[in-house]
Amino acid sequence: MTQYLAVTAMGTDRPGIVNKLAKLTASCDCDIIDSRVAIFGNEFSLIMLVGGSYAAIARLENELPVHAAQWELLTICKRTSEHTPVDFTARLVVEFEGQDRRGTMKQITQFLADRELDLAGFTSTARKGEDGSGLQQVEVRINATSRVDLDALETNLSDLADELNLNCRLRRMEGAHSD
């Protein structure tokens, strides 16, 4: 029976570090099922779902901390189970853009939490505009089941953007998605 391990690693971004983690995973007879890498400042962050036999997962759990210390990485591992896909009828991509203000992320994530929406992805970037003012871009990907009234949700998201004084673009992707 396949066992699953969620692994997070963080450290200074440098060429080859993700390859070292991939090699270690393979040497422990584990497979990388899913992974994401992001760069924040000079730090990289990797999260991956690893699968393997009980012995292979245990070996990776034991070997990773030793290698992580040598590679100057912070790591966290957590046993998990296989993802149970849900059939979604649509995905809504919402892009917010405007002046960077403290509390915007809190308000957007509160909106999503209050409606118990399935968050498929979330990215946020802050940068300086040409005039030196702070700008922000937030992209939210929402998975929707048939119980979600997409027209009402789009109206509510536009209202939220107006409240936050942000520009808002909405893209609806119809059709079943399994995530």
Image (tube, rainbow, N blue to C red):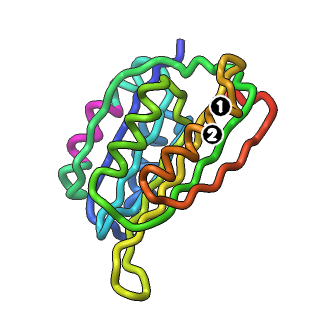
Classed neighbour count for the residue bearing mark 2: other residues with Cα under 10 Å, few (<14), some (14–19), many (≥20): few
Which amino acid lies under the numbered mark 2 shown in the image of this protein?
A: Thr
Residue 116 in the image, given as x and y percentages of width and height = 48, 23
Asked if 4 appears above or below 173 in the picture, the reply is above
Residue 49 in the image, given as x and y percentages of width and height = 47, 34
Residue sitting nearer the eye, 2 or 115: 115
Residues shaded magenta:
60-67
Instruction: Say which residue label 1 marks.
Output: 152
Quadrant for the C terminus in the image: top right
Residue at the image position 40 percent from the left and 50 percent from the top: 46
Instruction: Say which residue label 2 marks.
Output: 155
What main secondary structure does the magenta stretch of the protein show?
A: helix
Name the outermost residue toward the bottom: 131
Residue at the image position 62 percent from the left and 39 percent from the top: 155
Residue at the image position 44 percent from the left and 35 percent from the top: 111
Q: Quadrant of residue 59?
A: top left
Asked if 133 appears above or below 105 in the picture, the reply is below
Disc 1 + disc 2, Cβ < 8 Å: yes
Residue 68 in the image, given as x and y percentages of width and height = 24, 49
Q: Quadrant of residue 62?
A: top left
Residue sitting nearer the eye, 54 or 113: 113
Name the outermost residue toward the top: 1
Name the outermost residue toward the right: 175
Give residue 5's mark. Answer: none
Residue sitting nearer the eye, 15 or 149: 149
Q: Is residue 112 left or right of residue 67?
A: right
Disc 1 and disc 2: Cα gap in Å?
5 Å
| Mark 2 element type | helix
- Please check the rendered image and state whether residue 174 is part of the magenta-colored stretch, yes or no: no
| Mark 1 element type | helix
Residue 53 in the image, given as x and y percentages of width and height = 48, 20
